[in-house]
Image (cartoon, grey):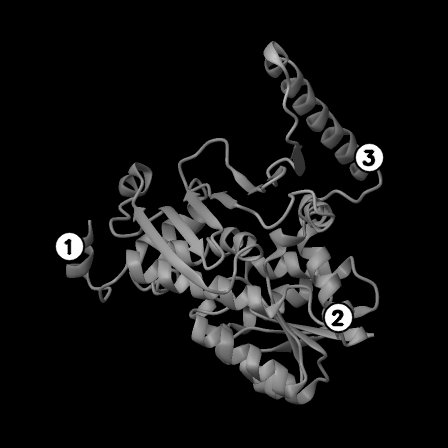
Amino acid sequence: MLRIAIIGCGKIADQHVQAIHRIDGCKIVAVCDSEILMAKQLAERFAIPGIFSNVADMLGQSSIDIVHVTTPPQGHYSLAKECLEKGSHVYLEKPFTVTAKEASALIELANTSGRLITAGHNYQFTPEMCQMREITSSGFLGGRPVHVESFFSYDLGDASYVAPLLGSSNHWVRRLPGRLLHNNVSHGIAKMAEFLDDEITEIVARAAESPRMLEFGGKGVFDELRVSIRDRLGTTGYFCFSTQIRPNVNQLRLMGPKNSLLVDQGCSSLIQMRNKPHKSYLTYFIPPLENAREHFRNARHNMAAFLRRKLYQDFGMTELIGRFYASVRDTRPPPIPYREIILTARIMDQIFEQIYPLPKTEETLDRQT
């Protein structure tokens, strides 16, 4: 029985608890938050016995196999380091760390201490993403992707998140190097990193505030991002993050030398686009029918998964956590390769250096906008 603890008892912690409860062979034995009331409330909601306000006390008094760190990103490095040094494996919510240097240091520590660590990139393990890997590994694309595109949108309509962020210049999101973007883009970047070489030869990033953000008074808080990428092997990529696009878009496009794939996580679908030339006017009839067949196949698959209770909102988180726990039990590599975690962090570093190149003072914000 794996003994699990959670550090950071905010909103996201509830999702972790619910996902963990779906996994056999584990038990949440402790929760910790510097605001002890938050820890008490989480423990009361889910009948968790151990309640702590100090990480050292929790690790010293309880035998913990795996710790989930769900605090703001600024604490990820120090908390994960402390847990690894005390012998616990670590699941770190996204973004993994604030910088790539911190990410590399944690992974090196995990390797030297014989512990495992992973990033909370749960969108990598939704049903359609798992199916995508099966198809690409079969050679469907015809080789390495020629071009990769990732689209990720976010709704600013949640006032409970946006209002505190914009109401205080000291809000933890605004103190990240990439501010609002830093807390949101890692999911979309990680999906690209899986298919890019470690050596990135070109990154060009452009960012701006949307009209909606400016209406909220968020001058200098970029919520629109466009990034072009090229790696050493010639694969190109494009990443788009937006708070304006409707309906919300969460897609991955893989364009290969033979065939291509579209993963649409908004409706849990995977569209296979085969290279089948058609003569004359058949070009206008056959491809739409084939696309309709793909959509029907996805609808049928999703309905069957729903009836079997295998389709639910946090499937990706449950799947990732379950695979991570299995890697701990079986002493095998974690579900997300360390290479991809570090590459994601490196790409994010370079993006934020381009869009927020100067010290973050009010004077700087005026010059940038």
Sequence order check: which comes first, mark 3 or mark 2? 3
Name the secondary structure under disc 3: helix
Residue depicted at 64% across the width and 85% down the height: 59
Name the secondary structure under disc 2: helix
Please state the horizontal and vertical placement of residue 231, each as a whole percent of the image.
46, 57
Q: Quadrant of residue 240?
A: top left
Please state the horizontal and vertical placement of residue 204, each as a whole percent of the image.
34, 52
Residue depicted at 64% across the width and 13% down the height: 282
Q: Which mark is residue 277?
A: none
| Residue that carries the numbered disc 3 in the rendered image | 304
Type of amino acid under label 2: Ser
Disc 2 from disc 1: Cα separation = 49 Å
How many tags in the picture? 3
User: Of all residues shown, which one is farthest toward the front?
Assistant: 279
Type of amino acid under label 3: Ala
Please state the horizontal and vertical placement of residue 311, each as a whole percent of the image.
75, 42
Disc 3 from disc 2: Cα separation = 29 Å
Q: Residues within 10 Å of mark 2 (few under 14, many from 20)?
A: some
Residues 273 and 211: in front is 273
Sequence order check: which comes first, mark 2 or mark 1? 2
Sequence order check: which comes first, mark 1 or mark 3? 3
| Residue that carries the numbered disc 1 in the rendered image | 367
Residues 21 and 334: in front is 334
Specify whether 177 is left or right of 259: left
Specify whether 229 is left or right of 88: left
Residues 78 and 145: in front is 145
Q: Are marks 3 and 2 in contact (CB under 8 Å)?
A: no
Q: Which mark is residue 327?
A: 2
Type of amino acid under label 1: Arg
Q: Quadrant of residue 156?
A: top left
